[in-house]
Image: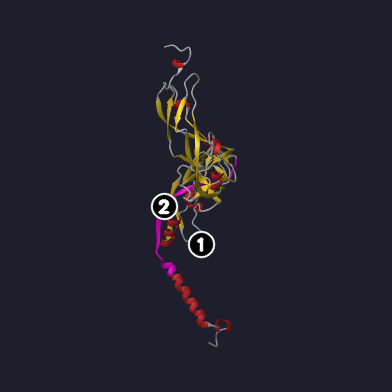
């Protein structure tokens, strides 16, 4: 090897092995099976002209994409999914025809896939002037807290409204925007939880912010029994009195410790609705439900006896002085 330049001769066996490996990998790539497949992919609009908004989804909203390339890359893209992102920088009319370009297809970096065709090659987009509105958020939850926990305060949110910008026809009459429901069954302690805004039915509408933070304060759930709460009833003017049996009921409260322990029994009111005793004749008896007021929000209650007996007192006017037979 004396005839070779020194820089070439140095570690010549290692360099020769690397060259051989490179040739092998190149040959492997060249012989890797290639394929061609057709997929149905969605069309996504990126409208930069803030004076306009799409009235709805483009027509068609999906197109047939034909790809060619290594089979494993086609399989990868099929699993991950892709879309055609159509940039709209300026709008000349309410009805626009756009010719789709192959480089708008998201294939990922370093791909060896080739877009063979898009069918159809054009889409129709209807635009209308864009408007802005501030709309209240509607908080939703699903499931129930674990049995040992209870909400100590209502669910809080870091922003009560979101700002929407989109077509006027879609935003008219919109009284609220919902967030994705928070699953209470997965809550283990007080904290903050980020949830996305529910964009169902809001395609083409720009939403700010796209997610909000919900605050939950939970405490140990406890029970407390309040005994001897008087049952109140009321007679219409001119009618004889209503007698209730029993005259008092026991109320069991269940909820967060702070809320339950803060209840003063004198603030509770157990009563019979007037319409349930209206029209009763003297001596008539009925069994009616009892209602309870004064229980804090987020606290549940139950009665040991949900029904009470009510009886219209007998008319005693005949026994009074001056009464008539």
Give left or right: position of 93 versus 118: right
Read off the residue under disc 1: 110
Residue at 49% over, 79% down: 16
Image position of 316 with respect to 199: above or below: above
Q: Quadrant of residue 305?
A: top left
Q: Is residue 155 visible?
A: no
At which x and y percent is residue 230? Answer: 50, 34
Magenta stretch, overall SS:
strand
Q: Residue furthest bottom?
A: 2
Read off the residue under disc 2: 39
Instruction: Name the element at disc 2.
Output: strand
Q: Nearer the viewer, residue 167 or 273?
A: 273
Image position of 269 with respect to 258: above or below: above
Q: Give the Cα distance between marks 1 and 2.
A: 20 Å
Which is nearer the N-term, disc 1 or disc 2?
2
Give yes or no for residue 278 being in the magenta stretch: no
Give left or right: position of 81 versus 217: left
Instruction: Name the element at disc 1.
Output: loop
Q: Is residue 284 visible?
A: yes
Binning the other alpha carbons within 10 Å of mark 2 as few (below 14), some (14 to 19) or many (20 upward) gives some
Please give the label number shown on residue 77: none
At which x and y percent is residue 220? Answer: 52, 50
Residue range of the region highlighted in magenta in the rendering: 28-50
Give yes or no for residue 30 being in the magenta stretch: yes
- Asked if disc 1 and disc 2 are in contact, CB closer than 8 Å, the reply is no
Which quarter of the figure is the C terminus placed in?
Answer: top left
At which x and y percent is residue 284? Answer: 40, 24
Q: Quadrant of residue 303?
A: top left
Binning the other alpha carbons within 10 Å of mark 1 as few (below 14), some (14 to 19) or many (20 upward) gives few
Q: Nearer the viewer, residue 110 or 157?
A: 157
Residue at 50% over, 82% down: 13
Give left or right: position of 50 versus 39: right
């Amino acid at each position: 090897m004396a005839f070779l330049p020194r820089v070439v001769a140095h570690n010549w066996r290692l360099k020769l092995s690397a060259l051989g490996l490179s040739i092998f990998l190149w040959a492997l790539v060249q012989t890797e099976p290639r394929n061609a497949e057709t997929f149905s992919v969605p069309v996504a609009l990126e409208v930069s002209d803030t004076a306009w908004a799409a009235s709805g989804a483009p027509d068609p909203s999906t197109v047939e994409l034909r790809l060619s390339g290594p089979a494993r890359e086609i399989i990868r893209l099929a699993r991950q999914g892709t879309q055609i992102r159509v940039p709209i920088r300026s709008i000349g009319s309410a009805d626009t025809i756009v010719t789709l370009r192959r480089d708008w297809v998201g294939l990922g970096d370093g791909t060896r896939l080739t877009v063979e065709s898009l069918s159809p090659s054009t889409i129709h987009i209807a635009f209308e002037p864009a408007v802005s509105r501030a709309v209240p958020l509607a908080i939703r939850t699903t499931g129930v807290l674990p049995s040992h926990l209870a909400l100590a305060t209502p669910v809080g949110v870091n922003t009560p409204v979101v700002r929407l910008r989109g077509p006027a026809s879609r935003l008219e009459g919109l009284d609220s925007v919902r967030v994705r429901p928070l699953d209470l069954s997965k809550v283990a302690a007080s904290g903050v939880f980020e949830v996305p805004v529910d964009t169902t039915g809001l395609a083409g509408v720009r939403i700010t912010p796209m997610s909000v933070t919900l605050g939950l304060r939970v405490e140990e759930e406890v029970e407390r029994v309040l005994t001897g709460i008087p049952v109140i009833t009321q007679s219409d003017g001119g009618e004889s009195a209503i007698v209730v049996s029993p005259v008092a009921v026991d109320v069991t409260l269940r909820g967060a410790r702070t809320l339950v322990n803060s209840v003063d029994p004198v603030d509770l009111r157990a009563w019979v609705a007037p319409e349930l005793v209206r029209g009763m004749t003297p001596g008539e008896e009925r069994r009616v439900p009892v209602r309870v007021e004064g229980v804090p929000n987020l606290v549940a209650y139950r009665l040991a006896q949900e029904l009470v007996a009510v009886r219209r007192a007998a008319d005693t006017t005949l026994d009074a002085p001056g009464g008539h037979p």
